[in-house]
Amino acid sequence: MSPAPTPRRTVLRTAGTATLALAAGCGDGAGDAPSATTAPLTPAGSATGPASSPAVPPDSASASASAPAAGELARTSDIPPGGGAVLKDRKVVVTQPREGEFRAFSAVCTHQGCVVATVEDGTINCACHGSRFRIADGSVARGPATRPLPAERITVTGDTIRLA
């Protein structure tokens, strides 16, 4: 004896739900507000550095000698010259194209909305479809993405990098 066939309505409802979930997860971000661009930042106190921002007390649950305090994206020592770091929980990539010059970009790939995975060999890399973006300006180095990563405004005070 064979099992009873699945009702057509159940199949259609399941397919519709799956399609909506897929569409929500793969948005292109076209409706997102544009991010402001940022000029290269150098640590505060240098002739070209931004003004200091008020200190934020460290988060007692996660503070350590190498972990950033609450409100911080990263410490300058965490971002290698010629490289960067993907901060997946904040959806931000911080790069240091040249010694002492820090940049930040959205970590959401402009192709299909995946969060980028790595920063290597001068590019920010999306593992989903292979797009690569330049660490200096977020521009597309290799598609399928056609739009650059939006820049994020940051401030660098001492050894602390924060969103502006």
Image (tube, rainbow, N blue to C red):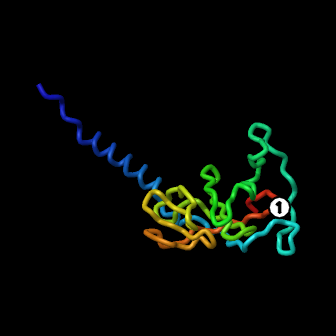
Residue ID at (78%, 64%):
155
Few, some or many residues within 10 Å of mark 1 (<14, 14–19, 20+): many
Q: Which residue is mark 1?
A: 157
* In the depicted structure, whether residue 59 falls above or below residue 91: above
> In which image quadrant can residue 128 be found?
bottom left
Residue drawn 43% across the image and 69% down it: 144
Q: Position of residue 81 (x, y in %)?
A: 68, 64
* Picture quarter with the N terminus: top left
Q: Position of residue 97 (x, y in %)?
A: 66, 69
Q: Secondary structure at mark 1?
A: strand
For the C terminus, which image quadrant? bottom right
Q: How many marks?
A: 1
With 20 as the anchor, is 125 left or right in this view? right
Residue shown at 77%/42% (left/top)?
A: 64
Identify the residue at the far left of this view.
Answer: 1
Q: Residue 160 placed where, x, y %?
A: 79, 57
Q: Inspect the image, locate mark 1, and give the three-letter code of the amino acid beneath it.
A: Thr
Judge whether 43 appears above or below 26 on screen.
below
Q: Quadrant of residue 130?
A: bottom left
- Residue drawn at 54 percent across, 65 percent down: 31
Left or right relative to 22: residue 86: right
Residue sticking out furthest to the top: 1
